[in-house]
Amino acid sequence: MTSKPEVEREWPDWSGQTALIVGTGPSASQAPLYLAEGVFRCIVIKSAYELAPWADVLYGLDRGWWIARRGAYKFKGLKVTPSPQAARVFGLRQVKLKIGARIIREPIGKLGCGLRDGGEGRTAGDPGGRCGAGGGR
C-alpha cells in the first residue's frame, strides 16, 4: 500500500461532496447561509467567516488581514493563507498560489490567482477542489 504524499494527508477529503464558497460581497449578508450548515461543506473568504462561523475552512490572502483580526482566533475550522508570515505567526495552513485566472485542481495545496503578482481579491482557484469537493450544478 502506498501512502499519500504529506501535503495530501494534510487536507480533508471531501470527495463527492458539494462545497459552498462564501465571499465578502454585499449579497452574502442577504443570503440565508444558515440553511447550508450541516448540508454542504463551506469555505469562507476573509470576513465572510462572521456570516458562517460554522464553516469548515477560512481563507485569507494577506498578512495584514490576519493581523487585524488577530488570526481570527474564534474561528474553529481550518485556516489557510498563502502568506508565510501569517502562517507562521498564527499557526495557519500555508497554501501556494499559481498565477493565472483559471481553476486548478493539481497539485493539492495550490490555488489559482488571477493577478500576475498574486494580489488580493483575485484568487480564482478552486479552494473546494483542494479537498476533492465539487461545486453545485
Image (cartoon, grey):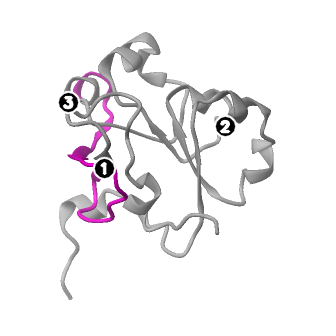
Q: Amino acid at mark 2?
A: Ala
The residue tagged with tag 1: helix, strand or loop?
A: strand
- Residue at screen point 68% across, 27% down: 26
Q: Give the side of residue 22 with respect to residue 1, left or right.
A: right
Q: Residue at x 64, y 27 (%)?
A: 50
Q: What is the residue that sits farthest to the top in this orientation? A: 68
User: What residue does disc 3 label?
Assistant: 84
Numbered disc in front, either 1 or 2 = 1
The three-letter amino acid code for the residue at tag 3 is: Pro
Q: What whole-number distance in Å separates the C-alpha atoms at marks 3 and 2?
A: 25 Å
Q: Answer with left or right where residue 116 lies relative to residue 125.
A: left
Residue 61 shown in magenta = no
- Label 3 sits on a secondary structure element that is helix
Count neighbours of disc 3 (C-alpha within 10 A) and say few if under 14, some if 14 to 19, many if 20 or more: some
User: Mark 2 packing: few (<14 Cα in 10 Å), some, or many (20+)?
Assistant: many
Percent across and percent down for residue 9 are 29, 63
